[in-house]
Amino acid sequence: MSAFEELVRARRDVRHFLTDGLDEEEVDRLLALAHSAPSVGLSQPWRFVRIASAALRERLAAHVDDQVARAGEIYKGEEDRLYRSLKLHGLREAPVLFAVYCDEGTETGHRLGAITMPEARRYSCVMAIHTIWLAARTQGIGMGWVSILDPATVDTMLGVPENWRCLGLLCLGYPTSEEAAPELERRGWEHRIDWRSTVVSR
Ligand SMILES: Cc1cc2nc3c(=O)[nH]c(=O)nc-3n(C[C@H](O)[C@H](O)[C@H](O)COP(=O)(O)O)c2cc1C
């Protein structure tokens, strides 16, 4: 297996973190690598908001707990019991926390490609997020993407500009364990489907 294949296969969404801090130079290196991601029109619309205050971190964690509980109201019986037992974020433990935004009003790139398909800016941000995810993993750092939130509530908490779109919260830190399979698979929530079933021909 090539080193790249190994990296892609070993990347995990992490929710269980050691509280050991990350080296700030390492965090900067990860952000710089994320910034080398492709972007429509070279618009580089990703914005990483560092959550530095303990009070804000707790407000975000409490908000996500609330949203996780609300989102779970659709489940019944055994599925409900399993859902309630899942850990769906590590916002309280991860030493480094970012909110990721897409600047949908950016003039960088002179709107090339964003007139016909404005959502391409969001896709560009997702490329940056995936880059940081893989880059972190090469250093033994884990990342968790938290999206079970109400974007408008988070925007208000963070006081971001009006045309920034929240794409989620990123938790970064050393994982408590190395896992070969997704946590949701190990917990019996879902399994990886055969990739062949996702390919359609006409
Ligand atoms: C856009 C996006 C949003 C996600 N949001 C959450 C989330 O809110 N909570 C969570 O526990 N995992 C979240 N995940 C992680 C997925 O559950 C995870 O990627 C999937 O189960 C596969 O596991 P793996 O990343 O370890 O391969 C998110 C992943 C993506 C790509």
Image: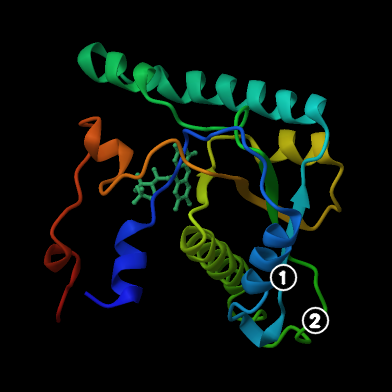
Location of the N terminus by quadrant is bottom left
189 is higher (above) or lower (below) than 181 = above
The residue labelled by disc 1 is: 45
Percent position (x, y) of residue 60?
A: 69, 29
As rendered, which of 85 and 178 lies closer to the eye?
Answer: 178
The residue labelled by disc 2 is: 108
Question: Label 1 sits on what residue type?
Answer: Pro
Query: Badge 1, how many Cα within 10 Å: few under 14, some, many 20+?
Result: many
Task: Please give the name of the residue rendered at 23% of the width and 35% of the height, measured from the top-left corner.
Answer: 186
Per the rendering, the mark at residue 98 is none
Is residue 146 found left or right of 98 in the rendered image? left
As rendered, which of 128 and 22 lies closer to the eye?
Answer: 22
Labels 2 and 1 touching (C-beta < 8 A) = yes
Question: Label 2 sits on what residue type?
Answer: Thr
Query: Badge 2, how many Cα within 10 Å: few under 14, some, many 20+?
Result: some
- Quarter of the image where ligand 1 sits: top left
199 is higher (above) or lower (below) than 77 = below
Task: Please give the name of the residue rendered at 64% of the width and 79% of the height, measured from the top-left corner.
Answer: 36
Total residue callouts: 2
